[in-house]
Amino acid sequence: MKTTIKDVADLAGVSFKTVSRVINNEGSVKPDTLEKVKKAIQQLNYHPNNAARNLAGSKAFSLGFIYNNPNAYYVIDMQNGILDECKERGYELLIHPCESVSESMIEEIRQMVKRSQLSGLIICPPLSESPDMMDQLADLDIQFIRIVSGSDESNLTSPCVLIHDREASDEITEHLISLNHEKIGFISGEQIHKSTIERYQGYLAAMQRHNLEVDPDWIVEGQYSFDSGVKGAQKLLSLDNPPTAIFACNDEIAAGALFAARLSGVEVPNQLSIAGFEDSPFSRQTIPKLTTAAQPTREIARQATRFLIQNVVAQRQQSTAKSLNHQHYQPSLVLRDSTSQFHKA
């Protein structure tokens, strides 16, 4: 026979309602009682019937993940992080990719929320950084949390996980300067991503702090792709006054820059240092491996999901407690073999 919630209650020696509170993560259960119920659930291998839970309330125990980001590694890490938390909390996940921001997208999302009875949305860049889209989402009767680049909370009106790209980029550039590099090129991603702007600002801040020249020719606009890194590095290396180091806006660009250097007969890191950003698999699959900034995308996604569920539960309980709003992450510098001391002639 299938294990029921009543079986769990009997084994734990608590009421049916108490088990229901634990399953629904309502946060009003004493720690010792919570532990007894969790042990009973584990011992009986009990799994909540989400269909029954959904019928019992006006909102489903399901979340939606909306993205329009072409970076496969980033999206997979996001999905896995969200799923990690959903599985632990007894929620289902609906994944909804969007190819672009269009006038019909908000209606598309509205219908998806209504059709699937979603109780919350997780939204990642660059969609999460579109002011118009966020204004329209605010009109929907649904909780959502955004993942955005930046560290300033002052103008935020909805729950966010903020990634300190600027500070991490400053640290990467500072590292290159400490290796005696004064001519440092920068290959950007698309301007639609706020991370591109934040990472460029961090690069500029470090250069200006050391009174180092930033030649406009050393700044190459690109895309978050390998091919963009190849073309950007080729452009930089063909200059009469080429940089001795390149800071690429992400690891995929940096891997492309490394390939371009090899095609040009430029040794990395002996003749050219290259640094990336994000600590994606690209940074560990190259030879040499890339210096980068570790951005724990899976953990960021999990934390965002945890915050969202807590806010959803608080809304269901009509709690007067203040909703959780913001979490901060700063990517950390990871030193590998693609950067080294520059020796002036």
Image (spheres, helix red, strand yellow):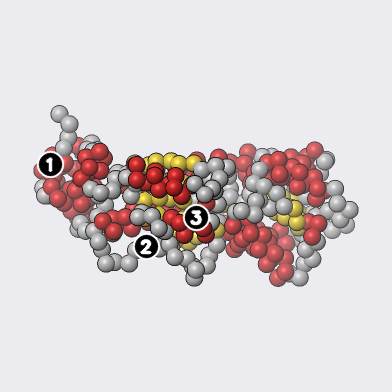
Q: Amino acid at mark 1?
A: Lys
Q: Nearer the viewer, mark 2 or mark 3?
A: 3
Mark closer to the observer (1, 3): 3
* Residue under the image location 18 percent in, 48 percent down: 19
Q: Indicate the amino acid at tag 3.
A: Met
Instruction: Decide: is 215 above or below 107.
Output: below
**Nearer the viewer's eye, disc 1 or disc 2?**
2
Number of other residues with Cα within 10 Å of mark 2, as a class: few under 14, some 14 to 19, many 20 or more: some
Amino acid type for the residue under numbered disc 2: Leu
**Residue furthest top in the image:** 1
Please provide percent x and percent y for residue 171. Answer: 63, 61
What is the quadrant of residue 50 in the picture? top left
What mark, if any, has residue 133 been given in the picture? 3
Can residue 22 be seen at all in this image of the molecule?
yes
The answer to the question of whether label 1 and label 3 lie on touching residues, with beta carbons closer than 8 A, is no
Q: Is residue 191 above or below residue 3?
A: below
Q: Residue 115, percent across and down?
A: 34, 42
Relative placement, left or right, of 143 versus 345 is left
Disc 2/disc 3 C-alpha distance (Å): 22 Å
Locate residue 323, reporting x and y percent. 34, 63
Q: Secondary structure at mark 1?
A: helix
Q: Is residue 340 left or right of residue 56?
A: right
Q: Is 232 in front, or is 270?
A: 232
Q: Tell me which numbered mark, 2 or 3, is placed earlier along the sequence.
A: 3
Sequence order check: which comes first, mark 1 or mark 2? Answer: 1
**Mark 1 highlights which residue?**
6
Counting from the top left corner in percent of width and height, residue 200 is at: 67, 60
